[in-house]
Image: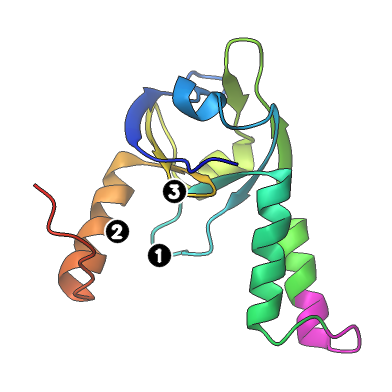
Amino acid sequence: MSILGGSAAHPMDAKGRVSLPAKHRRILPDDLVILPSPDKAFPSLWIYSNDAYEAWVEAVIESKGGFQANSASHSHLARVLYGKKEDISCDSAGRILIPHDLRRYASLEKSVVVIGAGNHIEIWNPSILEQSDTFYTETQHVEIFDLP
């Protein structure tokens, strides 16, 4: 899969449908996985292809020392990783329907920001994204580039 990048503001309709940018639709398959981000302080939604999601889950499990079937904490981790995901697909107009509970989790309203983040797409409430950027830049002193 190609790298997903760029960001754009998009409207969300009353039913919770958002159009994905055409450049992302050209890369992604029609069947996708959506899940809540793990950052509860600055919640957003992440969208993966099924293959990219499986690779991400494997990386998370490997970072915990690999899956051990007799470990209660590893079983819990697998349950959380697979239990929080929802399968979605793009309709003929290039829109996805964001489930109501995920819209509520990420505080999504009429306008969202869609960001290509390498192997996945992130969907943000614009004000939460701004708060996150401010926190990680100023408080955590995280600066990746000196971009104009």
**Dots 1, 2 in contact, CB < 8 A:** yes
**In the shown orientation, is residue 33 left or right of residue 8?**
right
- Taking the magenta stretch, the answer to whether it contains residue 70 is yes
Q: Which mark is residue 132?
A: 2
Q: Residue at x 61, y 32 (%)?
A: 28
**Dot 2: within a 10 Å radius of its alpha carbon, few (fewer than 14), some, or many (20 or more) residues?**
some
In the image, which residues are magenta? 68-76
Q: Which residue is mark 3?
A: 117
> Which dot, 1 or 2, sits closer to the camera?
2
**Dot 1: within a 10 Å radius of its alpha carbon, few (fewer than 14), some, or many (20 or more) residues?**
few
| Quadrant placement of the N terminus | top right
Foreground pick, 136 / 148: 148
Write down the quadrant of residue 17 in the picture.
Answer: top right
Tell me which numbered mark, 2 or 3, is placed earlier along the sequence: 3
Where residue 46 appears, x then y in whole percent? 54, 48
**Dot 3: within a 10 Å radius of its alpha carbon, few (fewer than 14), some, or many (20 or more) residues?**
some
- Taking the magenta stretch, the answer to whether it contains residue 138 is no
Q: Which mark is residue 69?
A: none
Q: Secondary structure at mark 1?
A: loop
Q: How is the image coloured?
A: rainbow
Q: Which residue is mark 1?
A: 41
Amino acid carrying label 2: it is Ser
Amino acid carrying label 1: it is Ala
Mark-to-mark CA distance, 1 and 2 = 8 Å
Q: Secondary structure at mark 3?
A: loop
Mark-to-mark CA distance, 2 and 3 = 15 Å
Amino acid carrying label 3: it is Ala
Tell me which numbered mark, 1 or 3, is placed earlier along the sequence: 1
128 versus 11 height, above or below = below
